[in-house]
């Protein structure tokens, strides 16, 4: 697989860099835009962002109109730079087929295992929009024997793998902390004995964090967490409260800071709907004043099926609003990790062969949104097969990016790979990038002041790592 993908990328360059008479075309995934008085191109397949000048525009226009002098291609520095960024490709390359290949390669890759485990569906909070408690009547905590069965099943899949990650979900998973430590201990020990990279991540409401839990996070390599905030303190405490009615805002903020102080990376999810999205600027300022990093913040799109939900266009604009607020209030360049668009090899781990989700009874699902709905399960720790659920879950994997004409003809396809299969069952929603990509890119262009250069093509962001690795491989040869 890696060899084939490398050949695709090498051919993209060699076909028209070293053969003087090769046919070329402008990539269908180029997005040309203007900010202030400057012209830019972003390529969604290679995720290159460049500032272009008049000479580069002329090269692109001449290729588009079939007037480019191909005999001079290999000596044309502008042409070479546009090739490096993926803005010009071989006429022989079917870019959609390449995306389809990349997608299948990602879905088939079994080197990296990821398991989502729900040790309980109980919760110590009573959030107004929670989807778990409202659909699950059986809120028991996982039994030790079930935990051991899950550990054994995971360990059996680990030989010859590069990495394994355990993702803890709920309910509130820390209500079953002993189960977390029990499974983590067994899997981590096996990984250590056989040189397999091990990590943990937890989705928690953040209310139960104490010194003992922080110590165990570090002991069991749970070095990442997602914790949610629902707006300013008054709004948050009305929506995200303990079962006794008391608000949770200050407890959560204190515990985020405690985790960050101990080197645990916290993704601070700001849940928004029509009732609180106008608070984005104020909550950013408040959280920054507490010392919470702006880099950790991102938006969560609440979907309850009510009139309070933002539609995808409104959510996309809210993401732009958050980006602008962070730029304004932090005066720092936002990292590529959080904000800059990246090529996806698949949308979600539920689409892959190397992941699944376990509920407290050891029942197995592909998508964690379906945990608790036994009809959607496909197996369990005893390897009993639910035929209907099996074929339902197989469809998460079997879809192709070419199945939908709408997706196949969309310039943002490489950034979303057709989106969430679970959500598409109910509504044919598109990625927010379809509605805000230009504004997100312009935000970056405003921060990344390009160096003074006489070059016609000035790279602000280099191509995806896949191209960079192939260039290194060619140099080694």
Image (spheres, grey):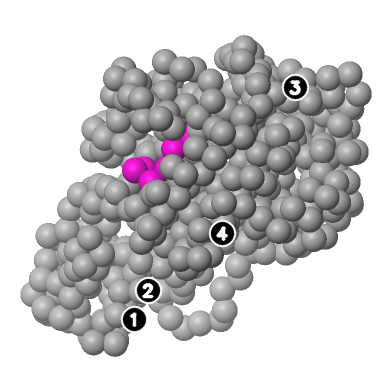
Q: Earlier in the sequence, mark 4 or mark 2?
A: 4
Q: Is residue 77 above or below residue 152?
A: below
User: How far is mark 4 from mark 2, CA to CA?
Assistant: 35 Å
**Residue 273 relative to residue 442: left or right:** right
**Label 2: which residue?**
468
356 falls in the magenta region:
yes
Q: Which residues are magenta?
A: 352-357
Q: Is residue 67 above or below residue 379?
A: below
User: How far is mark 1 from mark 4, CA to CA?
Assistant: 36 Å
- x 43%, y 42%: residue: 153
Q: In this rendered view, identify the residue nearer to me: 236 or 157.
A: 157
Q: In this rendered view, identify the residue nearer to me: 188 or 458.
A: 188
Of discs 4 and 2, which sits in the foreground? Answer: 4
Badges 1 and 4: C-beta atoms under 8 Å apart? no
Whole-percent x, y for residue 229 in the image = 76, 36
Seen as rendered, the residue at the extreme left is 21
User: How far is mark 1 from mark 2, CA to CA?
Assistant: 6 Å
Q: Which mark is residue 127?
A: 3
């Amino acid at each position: 697989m890696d060899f084939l993908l490398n050949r695709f990328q090498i051919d993209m360059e060699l076909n028209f860099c070293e053969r003087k008479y090769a046919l070329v075309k402008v990539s269908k995934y180029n997005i040309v835009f203007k900010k202030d008085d400057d012209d830019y191109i972003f390529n969604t397949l290679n995720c290159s962002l460049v500032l272009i000048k008049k000479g580069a525009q002329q090269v692109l226009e001449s290729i588009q109109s079939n007037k480019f002098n191909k005999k001079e291609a290999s000596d044309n520095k502008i042409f070479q730079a546009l090739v490096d960024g993926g803005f010009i490709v071989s006429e022989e390359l079917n870019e959609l087929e390449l995306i389809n290949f990349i997608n299948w390669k990602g879905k088939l890759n079994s080197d990296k295992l990821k398991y989502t485990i729900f040790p309980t569906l109980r919760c110590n909070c009573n959030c107004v929009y929670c989807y778990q408690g409202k659909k699950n009547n059986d809120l028991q905590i996982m039994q030790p024997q079930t935990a051991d069965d899950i550990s054994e099943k995971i360990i059996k899949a680990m030989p010859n793998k590069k990495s394994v990650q355990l993702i803890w979900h709920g309910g509130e998973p820390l209500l079953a902390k002993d189960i977390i430590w029990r499974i983590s201990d067994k899997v981590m020990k096996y990984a250590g004995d056989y040189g397999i990279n091990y990590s943990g991540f937890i989705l928690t409401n953040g209310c139960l964090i104490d010194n003992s839990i922080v110590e165990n996070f570090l002991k069991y390599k749970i070095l990442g967490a997602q914790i949610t905030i629902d707006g300013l303190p008054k709004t948050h405490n009305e929506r995200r409260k303990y079962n006794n009615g008391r608000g949770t805002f200050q407890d959560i903020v204190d515990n985020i800071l405690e985790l960050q102080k101990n080197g645990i990376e916290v993704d601070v999810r700001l849940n928004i709907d029509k009732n609180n999205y106008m608070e984005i600027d104020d909550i950013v300022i408040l959280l920054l004043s507490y010392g919470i990093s702006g880099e950790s913040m991102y938006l969560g799109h609440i979907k309850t099926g009510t009139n309070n939900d933002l539609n995808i266009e409104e959510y996309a604009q809210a993401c732009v609003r958050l980006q602008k607020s962070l730029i304004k209030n932090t005066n720092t360049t936002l990292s590529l990790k959080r904000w800059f668009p990246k090529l996806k090899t698949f949308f979600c781990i539920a689409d892959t062969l190397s992941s699944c989700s376990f509920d407290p009874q050891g029942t197995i699902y592909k998508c964690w949104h379906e945990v608790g709905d036994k009809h959607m399960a496909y197996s369990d720790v005893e390897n009993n097969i639910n035929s209907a659920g099996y074929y339902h879950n197989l469809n998460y994997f079997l879809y192709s990016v070419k199945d939908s004409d709408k997706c196949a003809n969309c310039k943002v396809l490489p950034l979303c790979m057709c989106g969430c299969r679970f959500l598409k069952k109910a509504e044919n929603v598109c990625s927010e990038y379809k509605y805000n990509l230009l504004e997100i890119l312009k935000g970056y262009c405003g921060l990344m002041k390009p160096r003074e250069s006489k070059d016609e093509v000035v790279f602000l962001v280099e191509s995806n790592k896949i191209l960079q690795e192939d260039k290194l491989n060619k140099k080694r040869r």
